[in-house]
Amino acid sequence: MILRALLQIGVLLLLPPLLLGVVNRVKAIAAGRKGPPLLQLYFDLAKLLRKGAVYSRTTTWVFRAGPAVGLAAIATAGTMLPVAGQPAIVSFSGDFVLFAYLLALARFATALAALDTGSSFEGMGAAREVSFASMAEPTLFLVLVVMARATGSLSLSGMLGPALAPAWRAAAPALLLSAIALFVVALAENSRIPVDDPNTHLELTMIHEVMILDHSGPDLAFILYGASLKFFLFGALLVRLVADVGATGFWSAEGAFVLELLAFSVLVGVVESFMARLRLTRVPQMLVGASILSVFALVLLLR
Amino acid sequence: MVLFVILVPLVLGALAFSWPDNRTRPGLLVAGAGLHLLGILSLWIHPEGPVMNGYLFLDAAGKVVVTTSSVLFLASAVYAQGYLRSRDDRDNRVFVGGLLVLLGAMTTVGMAQHLGVLWVAIEITTLATAPLIYFNHNARSLEAAWKYLLVSSLGIALALLGTFFLALSGAGPDGPRSLLLADLIRAGPALSHPWVRAAFVFLLVGYGTKMGLAPLHSWKPDAYGEAPGLLGALLAGGITNFAFLSVVRVYQVTNAAGEGAFARDALLGLGLLSMALAAVFMAGQRDFKRMLAYSSVEHMGILAVALGLSGAAVTGAFYHVLNNGLAKGVLFLAAGNIHRAYGSKRIDDVRGAARRLPISGPLFLAGFLAVTGTPPFSPFWSEFMILNAAIGMGRYWVAGLFLLFLAVIFIGMGATVLHVVQGSDVGAPSRPGFRDGWLTAGPPLLLLLAVLALGIWLPGPLLSLFQAAARLATGAT
Amino acid sequence: MGAWTDMAFILVVVLDLFLLASSRLGAAIRAVALQGALLSLLALLLTSSGHDLGHMLAVAGGAFFIKAFLIPWLMFRAIREMAIRREMEPLVGYVPSLILGGLGVVLSFALSRGLPLPTNEMHPFLVPTALATVWTGLLLVVSRRKAVTQVLGFLVLENGVFIFGLLLTDFMPVMVEAGVLLDLLAAVFVMGIVMFQINREFASLDTDALSSLKD
Amino acid sequence: MTALLALLAAVVATASGLPGLLFRRRPTLAQRLSAGALCLAAAIGFGAALPVLAGSPPSVLHHAWGQPFASLSIRLDPLSAIFLVPILAIPALGAVYGLAYWPQAQLGARAIRLQLWYGVVAGSMALVCLADNALLFLFAWEVMALGGFFLVRSDGDRTDAQKASWVYLVAAHVGTFAIFAFFAAVGSARGSFDFAAWAGLRSTGAAAGWLALLALVGFGLKAGLVPLHFWLPGAHAAAPSHVSAVMSGVLLKTGVYGLFRTAGFFEAPPASWGIVLMALGAASGVLGVALALAQHDLKRLLAYHSVENIGIITMGLGLALLGRARGAPGLVLLGFAGAALHVVNHALFKSLLFLGAGSVQHATGTRNLEKLGGLARAMPWTAGLFLVGAAAISGLPPLNGFVSEWFVALGALRALELPLLDRASFAVLVAPVLALVGALAAACFVKVQGTVFLGNPRSADAARAHESPRAMLLPMALLAAACVGIGLLPSLVVGPLSRGAAAWSGMPLAELRPDALGALDSAAWIARVALLLLALVGAVLLWRRRQRTAPDPVSETWGCGYAYPTARMAYTGSSFAQILTSGFRWVLFPRVRFAPPRGFFPSSSRFSTEPREAVLDLALLPAVRDYISATSRVRHLIAGRLHVQALLVLATLIAMLAWRLLWW
């Protein structure tokens, strides 16, 4: 039992950077390039953690606390996510509300840190981040509500647990719709194309990247690692929802889970390489569309 | 003692007309008011039976109104000391004498058990008031007096006709052939109904004009606007209440004759109409003394509505007679002070009164809150009693309109009052030499304290008095 | 005897109509005076054997003195002292007011048929005449411009009321009766004083000048 | 016994203003005394309330009163106690704050007046929660409203204070009339005006509907439910900040208390009432925060957030009503717990924020967001405490705001357990609405914290800012501590809340127990997660500190190559909110002034937006103006025309004769 918990934590803490590496590699291949090694992000993190940081005269302790709080919040959220068949470390009725609000806390901290620099670019990025997030938040909730309705459970572990398979038999269309909505939210929350371009170089078009312009050294490492962790969380949520191969054994379930996550990263990479970034003014429409989709899914279940 | 409280003011009035000295003459007012109040108090302690073979008797209903106006008159009399001192230029012979005669006549109205006597007394109050309105001897006050006299004389003539009708209704071979209230009520159904109805209509229009029920109210804004503040107080808190008492007397007879339903509908209609007109005319009123006139129209309307509702509402009505009388005293006396201090009663000129008159300004505001039925002041309770009665007997529309009008009036009146009281008074016109003195600011302050005290604790005897008056008015046993 | 009474009543009504039609102030005042005289006469004519004659004489005398003599004199004096133009200056034309008055007369006679008189010994014309006169008075007050003419109207109104009062002479206490007369006197008297004051304050006695008091 | 204590607390609070009047000679001492009196009142009040919350039976006090129908009846039950705690605590803290913020030593008469009314308001609020007789309630209610009016006018020379206080008074009075009618109707139906006699009102039929509507209008006006919120922003912005804290923190709550009480009278209210309340609450929540986003005035912004939070509370109340209609204890418990706890929480963090805003105004002399910035360096304590409040009001863990919102959200999800095909199960939509509101609030407070305290000063005033005196910091610190405490130990509040729910809904405690235990368990988990979070943050920061060897180098903010960034280039509050406000254009009706740059070498161009209060500025005031112009026309027909006046008399006579006399 202890071992399994440790293993779960291990997967939770170690796997995420790899996923982003996979995404980038897929994009590179699609673009006909060789691309960076799969473990590039690990190298970056290691390097950054060893470096010192440069701070602007404008900034206060808020700027320094931001990345730490962000990372801690995301990691804490992670403890509620059932990694494989078994329930998560933390699981109680209504925990998904805490899950969502912890992610919000991370956003709050990063955005404040961005505003602390007093730079117009970072202000811009923070504005876009919180605005789009507040449009994505209801969708996430709606999806979770749909799952709660379908599985009759009010905790993430329950929603994504064994009750899911029968739920798919009962209410496949609703769950499918909400899965699509969740995918859109995942792209938006992790600032991927088509919402945001993680490796653009024009500040005016950035969202997440421009927020963290001024962070350097370990702070930047925290932020990057937190981002990958968040990506992992959404990915896990999604794959548990759609691809719950009823694997029973612990190891097999674990393995299947990791494979599904890699597949999710590949999918994201494909989307990124074959879609263009939307104009910023179009992003709200997409997010609202997603939430309408999930409302429809909920109505299908309630009617 | 009954005759004493009537005669003392009259005698002193006569004395005032022959009193040589202009400075000391106002003292007679205080003397008259004090003796009058003492007499009333002794009547409270040792009630007396009918005198002058039943023509005069202070019953519960009369007691409420007479006591109210006696207190109010005392306050005004004290106020008059300060006021007339500031108006040394003017000969106050007629003013003082008229006021005392007015007091005597009012008391007579309160005690009259004979409709003829009642009518005579009402007529005297009118005649005594006209010259008082004209106290300022300028074109505006003259116009006001003239209008007051003409309109209310019309009303009084109609009232006399109505009195005749009533007499006629009892003139049948088996009728009482008398105008004594008791006889008429005892005769009850024996009275000839058509005549009773006709009488009620004429008397309601007649005394309603004195009350100032809309649309018979047209004399009020002019008279209240031009008369000195203390006369306004006596008009709004005294004479109009006595007119209401007269209507109550008439209603007693009509009700006893079995025409109550008709009478109630008529009262309800006029009352609601009055409140509506007050609500309409209050809005955007630029002259704060005329505004008070419309407030008086409103409260007469409330009384009429209460009487029209009958039942428990009438208790509230008599309570309201007291509250309204006192609160109106506060408002008019404070308004008079503000008028003196600014030499204007247009709200375009007057602002920051709370600064310039540290007592009268806030008093004006407090009086407004009191008269619009805001706790902790007593009108809140009487208005609630009336509303509660309306809802209790399922007259939801009446209650709804009642509340609606109260709300609109509150807004209309408050806008004006706040405009006058708040802000800074720099740049406002000023009349040097007038500031709050104890003689001018004390009386309204005491009246307000009385209203406040009644709002916090209503003595048992008063409540039972109101109930007795209500039983009397509605003929309930 | 009865014929005289009928004549008197009819004359009162005719005077009402005349007042409505007359364009001359002086004539109107004389008409009111004549009406007052007629009333005091009626007061005597209507006294049946039932009442004490002294009282009725007092009432009739008082009425005659005030209505037919004192008040007309006051008004003439007012007109003379203030050089009031002698026209009535109606707001409502003579013909319409005449028609209204006639209508009032017809109605009052018609209505008073319906009114059940509890005292049967009274004269049949009394109530209708009273009502018609009251109506005329009100019409005059409402429809004439000058203050003097409004006082006239008020007087006619009081006359009507007085006529009606004659119904009750037998059981209405003396005091009230006296009070009535006294009040009428006082009312008109004060009005007269007021009118002099008006004259001092304003150029004419036109009540339209009394319209400075607005909200 | 406890009721007597509570009454004593109310009396002490009411009288707390007197020292200022008595010891004019020694103003500082006087003000300390009155603040002390309020603290004493709070202490007594706690002594009365806590036992009741801990489960001792409700205590009643009955005494006759001279006024008709009225009686001096006091009742202290868990519901009253829950409201009584903040209602006495916040004014006490505000008074301490006032020692430095509104010193009698300098302001003299104005301060004395303020303290008098401040005490009256505090006492009457307490009395409102204690009253067990309709007329006593109404009495205290109106006195409270009146006191609020005078408090808002504390600096009555400012025209905005005059206008705002007047609008407030009118709204309060009209609301009182609705309650007036409601009480009269119920009282005359029940034959008694003691609340004790009102339990179990019939809630079916048109009559009940009208009654409920009256109560909703009356109390909704006080609580500031959309669209009845129009008076609120002006009043709260115009008042002195510690008064704003009291008004926004607890005065509004009396309206909520009224809604609770009234809902308690009815037996088995229909589900539709709950639905209506939830809809209203959702509208208030979303529109309130949307309006807040658009504000430039710090205090107006906070005031609009009160509308939002009242919306959240109302949603919870709606859920609880729905639960009573459907007999679902889970809904009742969680809905009630969420609403009641949010009442307390909002009182805590909203007062904290208003006090913070007061400190900002005190330090810089302005409330305009576009003129502030960079205050965190000048006033670090204020900034930190304000940040706690901002995070709490955004519903972020590990603070108290999250706990209450979590209760409501979970309650909404319990609607899923209703039988299939039950329309009421759509109540679950409250949860996503709550998420939206929370996210928008977070966005708004990122904007506030960022533009006020972070970055560079945007004006000379902001640059001259200084830290507030200790008397102003202490109350804020206490409030912040309370926010954190409830956030870390939510399990403590579950017990009292469940007792309150039982007392309110009339359900036996045993029926609620299973859900209460479930909530307790979850609360314990929340506490653990919160601790874990703090531990992680601490660990990361600690590691950061240990691995840092040399002091970090310092430079300018990276301006993408531009070397001299100035405050004028920094992102302003309005541009920060632009994306979201443009989405809510249809409710904000902003007045936009735009002078675009012209020519090849544009010299100057300006752009400014000014949000308008839709209900007040675009609907009510124009209506009033039209009404006045219409009435003045009517007035001139009559005024000054003697013939018309005489004609009126004649016409009335004829009309009445014609009415009855012609056909007998």
Image: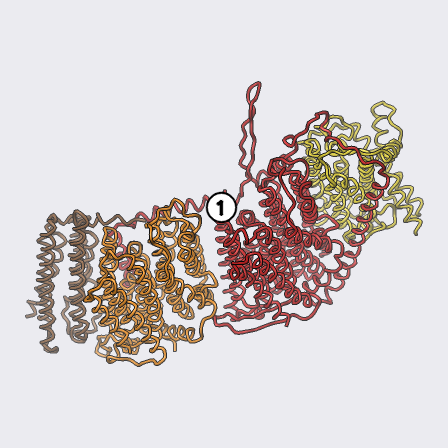
Q: What amino acid is at disc 1? A: Arg
Looking at the rendering, which quadrant does residue B9 occupy?
bottom left
- According to the picture, the residue beneath numbered tag 1 turns out to be D158
**In the rendering, what colour is chain B?**
orange
| Viewer-side residue, B74 vs A121 | B74
Q: Nearer the viewer, residue B188 or D34?
A: D34
Q: Nearer the viewer, residue D391 or B441?
A: B441
Q: Which chain is red?
A: D
Q: Is residue D278 left or right of residue A52?
A: left
Residue D321's quadrant in the figure?
bottom right
| Chain letter tied to yellow | A
Q: Nearer the viewer, residue C207 or B326?
A: B326
Q: How far across and how far down the image is residue A144, in percent?
A: 75, 47
Chain of the residue on which disc 1 is drawn = D
Compared to residue D161, the image places residue D329 above or below, namely below
Chain letter, brown in picture:
C
Residue D1 is at least partly visible in this image: yes
Q: Is residue D390 visible from the viewing direction of this image?
A: no
Answer left or right for A67 relative to C107: right
Tell me the quarter of the image containing the N terminus of chain D: bottom right
Q: Is residue D540 left or right of residue D77?
A: right
